[in-house]
Structure formats: C-alpha cells, structure tokens
Image: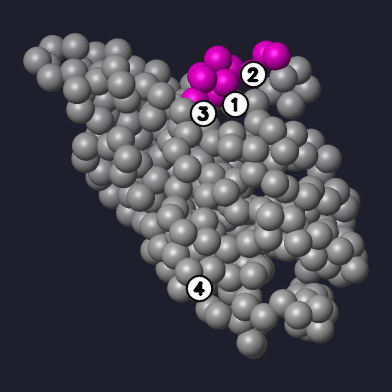
Amino acid sequence: MLWFRKRMRAEIKRNSSSAENTLLAGPWIGEFGWELFCWQGYLRARSAEFDRVVVMSRPEMAPLYADFCNEFIPYQPLGVGISGFMCAGHLDWPDVVPAQGYREYINGNFYIGYNRDRPALSSKAFLRQKFFKYGSFDPSLAFDVVLHIRQTDKNRSGIRNGWNLNAWREFFEHMQHKGVQKVGCIGHPESAGVLEGCADLRGWPLNKLFDVLASSRVLVGPSSGPMHLGALCGCHHVVWSGVEENRPKYEKYWNPFSTSVRYIHDSAWRPSVDTVLRHTLEMLEAAKT
C-alpha cells in the first residue's frame, strides 16, 4: 500500500493488491477554505487515474465531491476549533480534543499549498488542481447581496470576525437607502449572525448554498471559507482581511474562474462602512452586465 500523508490532516491510500484501482482519500479534518482549494480540487485532478474514488469528510461536505466521487463516507472530527491547513488549535485550545485524538493524521512534512513568499515554489499538486464550478441559477434564490456575518470564537479568532452587529446594521441600512432590496445571510447558525430584514439562509445544505451564490449578485464579508466558496460559484464578492498576504489567494490563486472580487486590507479587520458600501454598490452595478 502506498500512501502520502498531508499536513492538512488527510491522506490518500492506494491498495495495490486490489483488482480495482481505488482511491481512498481522507478523512479531511482541516478548515473549509483549505478543503476547497487544497484538497477537493487535487482529488478531482487525480480521480481520472482511478476506477473508483472514495472520499471521507464532514457529512455536510458531500456535495463538494459529487461530480467525481463514487462513494462518500461521512466523518465528523471530534474537535470544533480546527483551522487552517495545519489544523491550528488541535493542541492549544479547550474546544478541541487532545492531540492523541488525531495521532493518525497529524504527522508529516508536506502539504499542498501556495508559497506566499515565493509563488513559483508552490507545490506542483497545488498548481495542478482541477476545479468545478458549483451551483445553478435559480431566480427564486437570487439575492442582491448575500452577507456572511462571521461570529466564530474558534481558536480565539474574534478579530477576524470583522464588524460587530451594529456596523453590519449600519451597512444594511445604507444599502436599503441605496435601493438594495433583497439581502440574505449565510453561514452556520452557531458561528454567523443574521440581521432583521434579511432572509436567514444560515444552515442551508451546501448544494442549496451553491445555488444561492450562483444566482446572487454580490457576496460580502470578512475572509472566511464561505467567502472563498463564492469564487467557485461565480458570485462577485467584496471581502476584507487584516493581512495583505491573503490578497493573491482571493484575486488569483484561489480564484480559478476569475470571479470578480474587491479585496480590502484593513489591519484591524474593520474597514469603514463607507468603504465596503462603495465597493458593494460598484460590484452590484458590474453584476448587471
């Protein structure tokens, strides 16, 4: 049996003794954004080499693999604070299980990733991924603006939530004054907020979320997995982050279909409401064409 272990807490196994050429991949226990751009695309690119593809990930992630996966095995990691390709938090915070719970998955010294300091040295596996454009247009799911009001506490990442609810309400009110009528809020109900006057789309199945993003005009929020998903659904997005190094991921390396994006760098993760509003209105206008 030949296997390659990944720092992203997943592995690929190939059983050379089997008559059937099968790819067994996973379980994936890393962060959603890294699963989108450093795992599922890699498996899709490799899938043509195999007669059968079996993938393991969190139960709700099955739609990510439906276009090429023969069998999906749901696997729920015990921790809830896992983040990043290295699963930061598996040792440090009380919201995850002790490291021995991941003993089988946390070794190794290679990962499929983008070298932000020297892009040309990014792993070949990262550069050779194959992506699938998710979602279909459905007029009943078409929103002017979709918000991801990030409110997670995993790994004490509160600063990355960006605005507080008061700022989000101010932004929503300004949009209404500008004639924006149909707004929805996405995300997990336990880690994303919703505003009065907005459709509550939180907790929707992933395949339904694909259609929302493929049908809507602009997605707005701080950097997160759902914001990265917008790029794979063709939804224009306005996103902000506290680090400039995330810009090339949103604009190029994690944007395989060249989806329109406005990236705002603000070290405090709290750009002004006026700045985000201006970019959102400009993107709404561009989305009409």
Left or right: residue 202 versus residue 58 is right
* Picture disc at residue 274: none
- The residue most toward the left is 19
Q: Is residue 106 visible?
A: no
What residue lies at 63% left-to-right and 62% top-to-bottom? Answer: 217
Q: Which residue is mark 1?
A: 113
- Residue contact at pointers 2 and 3, CB within 8 angstroms: no
Q: Which residue is mark 4?
A: 201
Circle 3 packing at 10 Å, graded few (<14), some (14-19), many (20+), is some
Q: Which residue is mark 3?
A: 7
Circle 4 packing at 10 Å, graded few (<14), some (14-19), many (20+), is some
Asked whether 285 or 214 is in front, the reply is: 285
Q: Amino acid at mark 3?
A: Arg
Mark 2–mark 4 distance (CA, rounded to whole Å): 36 Å
Q: Which quadrant does the N terminus fall into?
A: top left
Q: Earlier in the sequence, mark 3 or mark 1?
A: 3
Asked whether 67 or 249 is in front, the reply is: 67
Chain part drawn in magenta? 120-129
Local SS, label 4? loop
Q: Earlier in the sequence, mark 2 or mark 1?
A: 1
What residue lies at 47% left-to-right and 43% top-to-bottom? Answer: 133
Predominant secondary structure in magenta?
helix
Circle 1 packing at 10 Å, graded few (<14), some (14-19), many (20+), is many
Q: Quadrant of residue 237?
A: bottom right
Q: Is residue 71 magenta?
A: no
Q: Which residue is mark 2?
A: 122
